[in-house]
Amino acid sequence: MIRLTRIIIETWLYDIHYLGFNLNNWFILDIGAFVGDTALYYAKRGAFVVAIEPLLSNYEIMVKNLELNPELKSRIIPINAAIANEDGFIEFKHNTTFDIILHLMVVLQYITLIVDLLLRLSL
């Protein structure tokens, strides 16, 4: 929970991925795209992004995030695959109950972040 909140805050509030120059029409390869937060960040700054995420549950959230940002969707190509130094297949083992809990935690983190920002703005 803390890690995901930190990722959201670092990416969007503290702007840690800012490279210091114009990204218009740059090509970004985001390997391990998670839920698409970094891909959306670079697309918002004008880059074209290929976002590769091997874990299906993260990939599905990334696709939903792209649907929620239609103005950026055309700049991002999501791919559900893994990158390796050899051909083959791998099975990712994960707990679907954990995924449901993680999704609920993400929603709660967004709510907490929004409330915190609103409180800061009202001071």
Image: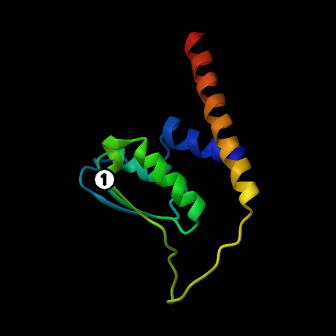
Which residue occupies 63% across, 22% down? 115
Q: Image point 71% across, 66% down: which residue?
A: 94
* 102 to the left or right of 84: right
Give 123 or 108, whichever is nearer the viewer.
108
**At label 1, which amino acid type do we have?**
Arg
Position above or below: 94 against 22 = below
Relative image position of residue 112 (x, y in whole percent): 66, 29
Residue occupying the point 54% across, 52% down: 61
Residue at image point 24% right, 54% down: 25
Residue 83: % across, % down: 50, 77
**Does 61 sit left or right of 41 as displayed?**
right
Q: Is residue 120 above or below residue 45?
A: above
Q: How many labels does the image show?
A: 1
User: Which residue lies under the disc numbered 1?
Assistant: 75
Give the position of the N terminus as an image quadrant: top right
- Dot 1: few (<14), some (14–19), or many (≥20) neighbours within 10 Å? many
**Can you give x and y, in whole percent of width and height, for residue 76 in the image?**
35, 56
Residue furthest to the left = 25
Looking at the image, residue 66 sits to the left or right of residue 107; the answer is left
Q: Is residue 8 shown above or below 119?
A: below
Seen as rendered, the residue at the extreme top is: 123
